[in-house]
Amino acid sequence: MAVRQRYYLNFLDCIISAIIGLVAVVCFQGSLDGTFIFDDVQAVVNNKDVQLATPIYKTFRNDFWGTEVASNTSHKSYRPLTVLSFRLNVWMNGGVLDPRGFHVLNVALHGMASALTYPLFCCLFAKTKNWDVKPLVASLLFAVHPVHTEAVAGIVGRADLLCAVFSITSLLTYAHATTMESAESLQFTFLASFLSGLAMLSKEQGITTLGLCSAFDLIVANTIFPSDILMALGRVSKDFKIHRSGIILFKKAAGYQAFIRKQYRYMLWRQLILFFMGSTIMYMRCWVMGFETPQFQKVDNPASFADGILTRFINHNYIYSLNGWILLCPEWLCFDWSMGCVPLIKLDRIQNNPRILSIILFWLVAFGLAKNVFNLKYSFSLSQNLAMSQACLYIPFLPASNIFFRVGFVIAERVLYLPSLGYCMLVAIGMEYLYDKVEKKIFIYAGFVMLILANVSRCYQRSLDWRSEPTLFKSGAVVCPLNAKVHYNLAKTSFNTSKAINHYREALRLNPEYEQAMNNLANVLRDNGDIRESETLLRRAVMLRPDFAAAWMNLGIVLSNQKRYDEAVSCYMTALNYRRFYPDCYYNLGNLYLAQQMYTEAYNAWKMATSQKPQHSIAWNNIIVMLDSLGELDKAELMAKEALTHLPDDSALHFNLANTLGKRSLYEDAEYHFLVSTRLKPNTALYHTNLGVLYHRWKKYKEAEEQYLIALSINNDLKNVEQNLKAVQKLLLKSQTTN
């Protein structure tokens, strides 16, 4: 077989790629002003690996969420390159977490990936003629597909975007390797494998790129179809015998020389390299995970926990059909599909469940597409294109299919970013087929333009949903009203207490064992004074999940409020047993000790909170105020100055330090810190009041009068300030009379 003919991109093709990239960027510009939302908070905001102060090597020891990958609690999502890209954003913004920079890079990566799809589709479609528009149709559809919104508008989607860029680059590199028959071909194969490894270090799905490279080599580069392989196996089965030792001996070895003849030599070497590199990468990946799979809860993926193989098979196939429908008609888009979003199909009620029809339709379509791959009577190129498009659709989806291992989600729209390459190819093939069959071509043109415009509109609309949590969660309630997590998140972002309570109760109605909703509802009820129900909910939460540290801490707070101190201490200690790094728990434990006048224990607890979290402002301030009230002014001053090294712009720290310095008659130093506190928070009446008292004691009556007046302008109900003002005005009048 001759070396695969290579299509060289011309200047026009480069312009087309650039335009496609620009279109992709324009579609998602609505997300540029977005904030950190949903999973972004855990993966970016609360992830210490993103901070520049954290050593880079920890990025390679921890998972995507900042948990040590060897830990039992880790999700085993090992994506160090993605985390490093987050650090790059922070570094470019001077060490500050700015969501706009993150969103800009996400949109730029989508533009880059979309631009690269055009030369990729030229390779996948084996384009040899300029007038073949299938690559243009497919790449345009990829650029504007609304299912990509989660990957582009959600910052955690960076993993999918980086994975796609590396995967597409790997495929293009491998395609170049298939155009030559020399050692250079093998060098490019190693390079493609390396790029696939980078894709996997961005997201686990990247390993499937090696499978796509293998499929491309067989289907496109060497035109070996599944039917050819089946026929060859059929011939082989007639011409071998099995020796007693178990070794297969071919009777007609010469008859199979065609399979390994010279023109296939480099293809076989490339396939061996792909297999070797894939095995090595997979072994390294498993080694990093400690050869353990992540542990998920039933609510994360109910279908995989269903009883019976047949029940799981039916429900997984229904989920496949939903993924296909989302690609075909991206109207049902939701930020989370777990819990009750997709109710299980149960065998005892299957005959009355219309959803079974979608499974049947899904398999009819899949079988029809597969059948045409084996049927060459229509067109060789059509069968080739169908085979490659299905490979691009199915192979990248395999890690999310629950076939090899359980995944922690039902449907994840960003997981469809790479598989959508195959879908876009199928649409392009279908449009070309219709174009050849329909006499009035204008209908095909008009239909495609309408499809692109509809997708652009949906992309922009959906990217606006992803700009803030309230809009995102409200959109989720429309698509998945039975999802308890949707109501849980609506409650978290609600500023209306009664609405928040209602959403939490709805979440618990939909999922009575939703311990996080119990914990949050208990906190809201506690703040509203309903201590009894709050305690009941928290005890239920820790019963369902004994290692729920936050619920143990909150139960301790509830018990402490009831002065049940011994029980509260036990709860705090249990929380710290499950989560040793827990500054908030130490802070609340300190409050409990203070209420019991156990000052040394309170000091130690708050100090532990500040050692674990040096920016724990409230703990620092509690230490200073307590020491001040105990008369330990020197120690209070030292603590305040230490705290200011971590929180130089904390107005409360400056205020409390000023009070301490004032008591020591260090008026100038006290004045300085009072002025800093009033500059940081000019509308705090207490700051101006105490500064007035300082001036009053310092006998700077004019300045004291000025500060008292400012305090009263902020809050005119301060009776003690009115009395102080009258006193200082009398002193001013007396001094003027004396003069």
Image (tube, rainbow, N blue to C red):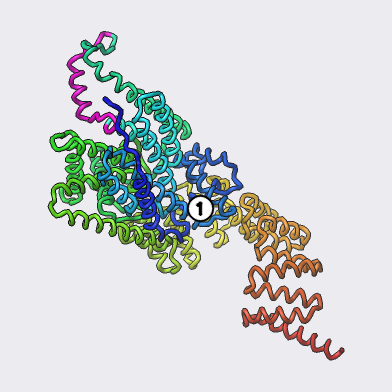
Of the pair 45 and 118, the residue shown nearer to us? 118
Residue position for label 1: 550
Local SS, label 1: helix
Residue at the top extreme, as displayed = 244
Viewport quadrant of the C terminus: bottom right
Viewport quadrant of the N terminus: top left
Q: Name the quadrant containing residue 406.
A: top left
Residue at the bottom extreme, as displayed = 737
Of the pair 531 and 69, the residue shown nearer to us? 69
Q: Position of residue 287 (x, y in %)?
A: 47, 31
Residue 510 to residue 193: above or below: below
Q: Position of residue 459 (x, y in %)?
A: 34, 57
Q: Position of residue 255 (x, y in %)?
A: 21, 14
For the point 44% across and 68% down, the residue is: 497
Magenta part, dominant SS: helix
Question: Which range is magenta?
Answer: 219-244
Q: Position of residue 544 (x, y in %)?
A: 42, 49
For the point 50% across and 36% down, the residue is: 70
In the image, taking residue 527 as reference, residue 29 lies left or right, namely left
For the point 34% across and 55% down, the residue is: 334
Of the pair 623 and 169, the residue shown nearer to us? 169
In the image, taking residue 19 as reference, residue 239 lies left or right, namely left
